[in-house]
């Protein structure tokens, strides 16, 4: 068996999710190659070569692959996939953008969002917002799989894989990059942060989200939100955690003024330690919390910040 892992890039650098996808690939077993595709991605390729379990890093460094557009990257994957039994990517926006194209063009079914590997053809994936786990088996010769990064512990950086250039350059007349607008933040990226503090409808308004800033600064945390807080316009939707937002599994997740609806839990319940601050001691969030603080967040947050 041989496995190709599509590397996730964040601003041209290797994103943390890739180390988790390689952990899933190791459980499948076989030779693991990593594809790093983009423009000016040598540093990302070097970082991928250090990940434990990687046999070879294949680098497609060309302007046509810049900005990770789905059309050229999908076509590149189609070109390369014949050498592999499995193609894996993280279930991030990148992986979700690329792999369905590959699966469709190869006429195989995609296995999405796996959280466990039973064998080389059988996997587990959550359904119904994580309330049930489906075991799925693929008979396709090529398995195209997106991996939920939080389901697998990252491999370490003890590897020393070889790096080789891929000289396949595909044409792309279907799409072009126009612009991107990135939210400027000194905070860690929400999906990969070790600590996340999220606010919900209980925050009352967007201005009150500033109460989370001081704590986030002290803990080096990313700030997230519930969908109710996003829908109410308190904060932008790239901060949403949950079934229809980002899936996070940090070392520490602090939920402030969040009731704990199943759709929110679907995005954070795998966090290592969960702290909930809520004035309602019946709030469902306390059923998943390791530590609960029952009280008014407007009193607790300043006190917590001063104690930190
Ligand atoms: C298809 C679908 C997808 C969805 N996807 C998501 C998703 O991705 N993410 C998500 O979060 N939700 C999602 N939802 C919405 C979800 O069902 C809930 O409506 C939402 O999570 C509620 O957000 P909340 O906990 O902030 O608000 P609420 O449920 O209104 O809870 C607010 C909490 O704040 C507490 N509170 C109020 N004032 C204070 C105070 N002063 N001090 C302390 N505590 C206080 C209250 O006791 C309450 O528990 C989805 C829903 C659907 C139908």
Image: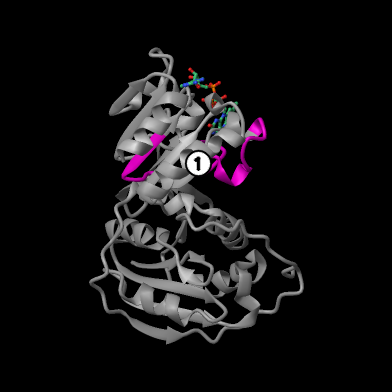
Work out whether residue 42 can be spotted. Answer: yes
Residue ID at (29%, 27%) = 291
Q: Where is residue 244 in the image (x, y as percent from the top left)?
A: 57, 38
Q: Locate residue 85 relative to residue 78 in the image: left or right.
A: left
Residue ID at (27%, 69%) = 157
Q: In this view, does 284 lie above or below 111?
A: above
Specify the segment rendered in magenta.
231-254
Let me know if residue 292 is in the magenta part: no
Q: In this view, does 128 lie above or below 35?
A: above
Q: Is residue 31 above or below residue 223?
A: below
Looking at the rendering, which quadrant does residue 245 occupy? top right
Identify the residue position indicated by label 1 in the image: 224
Looking at the rendering, which quadrant does residue 17 occupy? bottom left
Q: Position of residue 19 (x, y in %)?
A: 35, 62
**Main SS of the magenta segment?**
loop
Q: Residue furthest left?
A: 158
Let me know if residue 252 is in the magenta part: yes
At numbered mark 1, what does the secondary structure look like: helix, strand or loop?
strand
């Amino acid at each position: 068996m041989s496995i190709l892992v599509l590397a996730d890039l964040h601003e041209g650098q290797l994103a943390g999710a890739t180390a988790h996808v390689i952990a899933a690939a190791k459980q499948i077993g076989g030779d693991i190659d990593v594809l790093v595709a983009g423009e000016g991605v040598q540093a990302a390729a070097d970082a991928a070569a250090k990940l434990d379990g990687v046999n070879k890093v294949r680098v497609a460094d060309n302007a046509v692959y810049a900005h990770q557009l789905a059309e050229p990257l999908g076509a590149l994957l189609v070109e390369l996939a014949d050498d592999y039994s499995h193609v894996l990517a993280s279930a991030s926006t990148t992986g979700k953008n690329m792999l369905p194209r590959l699966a469709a063009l190869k006429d195989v079914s995609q296995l999405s969002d796996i959280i466990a590997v039973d064998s080389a053809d059988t996997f587990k994936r959550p359904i119904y917002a994580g309330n049930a786990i489906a075991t799925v088996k693929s008979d396709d010769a090529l398995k195209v799989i997106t991996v939920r990064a939080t389901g697998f512990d990252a491999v370490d950086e003890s590897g020393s894989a070889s790096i080789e250039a891929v000289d396949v350059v595909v044409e792309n007349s279907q799409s072009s990059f126009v612009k991107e607008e990135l939210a400027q933040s000194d905070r860690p990226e929400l999906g990969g942060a070790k600590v996340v503090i999220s606010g919900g409808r209980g925050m009352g308004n967007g201005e009150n989200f500033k109460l989370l800033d001081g704590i986030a600064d002290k803990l080096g945390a990313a700030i997230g939100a519930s969908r109710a807080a996003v829908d109410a316009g308190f904060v932008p939707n790239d901060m949403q955690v949950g079934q229809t937002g980002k899936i996070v599994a940090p070392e520490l997740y602090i939920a402030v003024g969040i009731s704990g609806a199943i759709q929110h839990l679907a995005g954070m319940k795998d966090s290592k330690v969960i702290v909930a601050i809520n004035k309602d001691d019946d709030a469902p969030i306390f059923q998943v919390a390791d530590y609960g603080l029952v009280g008014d967040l407007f009193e607790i947050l300043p006190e917590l910040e001063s104690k930190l």
